[in-house]
Every structure is written in C-alpha cells, then in structure tokens.
Image: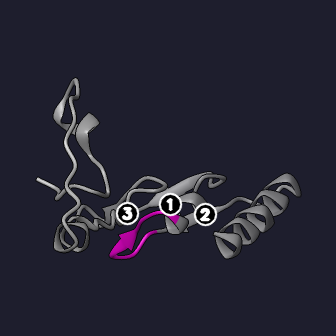
Amino acid sequence: VTASEQIREELVAAKKAGKPIVVSMGGLAASGGYWISTPANYIIASPTTLTGSIGIFGVINTVENTLGSVGVHTDGVSTSPLADISMTKALP
C-alpha cells in the first residue's frame, strides 16, 4: 500500500508540473497498479488486461473446524447469505 501511494503521489506531482501522465497496463493491473493509474491523462490496456478495483483481493480465514474439534458450534439468523459470513462458519 505504501509503495503504491508513494508512486501515485510522484505521478500527481509530475502532472501538476505540466507533464502528461500515460499509464500502460500489462497483463494485470489490480489494487496498487490500479491506484497508481488514477492520476493518468491516458490509460492504455489490452482487451485481456485483468484490471481490478482497489481492495479486490481478500482473504477470509475461518476457524469452524478448530472450534468444532473442541465442541464449539455457532448458529444465527441473517437477512441474506452474505450477511451470514463469519470466521466461525464455513464459506459457501
């Protein structure tokens, strides 16, 4: 995160100095690569470039097997399937 922000800040400074910013995306431009491209005047990407938004990748750790091995189980009521995501339950 820090490195991407530092690069983006330098691109913003270059743009403020009147230099045009052109970003060329390779095969993947997700999270930090996507963030870096935000000050660009022009963005060049091929139709096969995987472009994602900031925070698109994430990890959800679950501990239901560990809890189950010691006899702890969870239950609950929710308004939708996504509202029922918990680290104490297996993901669907």
Q: Secondary structure at mark 3?
A: loop
Residue in view at x 33 percent, y 67 percent: 61
What residue does disc 2 label? 36
Residue shown at 18% from the left, 65% from the top? 71
Which label number is shown at residue 57? 3
Helix, strand, or loop for circle 2? helix
Residue in view at x 32 percent, y 57 percent: 87
Q: Are marks 1 and 2 in contact (CB under 8 Å)?
A: yes
Residue 56 percent coordinates (x, y): 39, 57
Left/right placement of residue 58 relative to residue 78 reads right
Hey, which quadrant is residue 40 in on the image?
bottom right
Assign the magenta stretch its main secondary structure: loop
Q: Nearer the viewer, residue 75 or 14?
A: 75
Residue at mark 1 = 34
Local crowd size for mark 1, using a 10 Å CA cut-off: few (<14), some (14–19), many (≥20): some
**In the rendering, at what x and y percent does residue 85 appear?**
26, 46
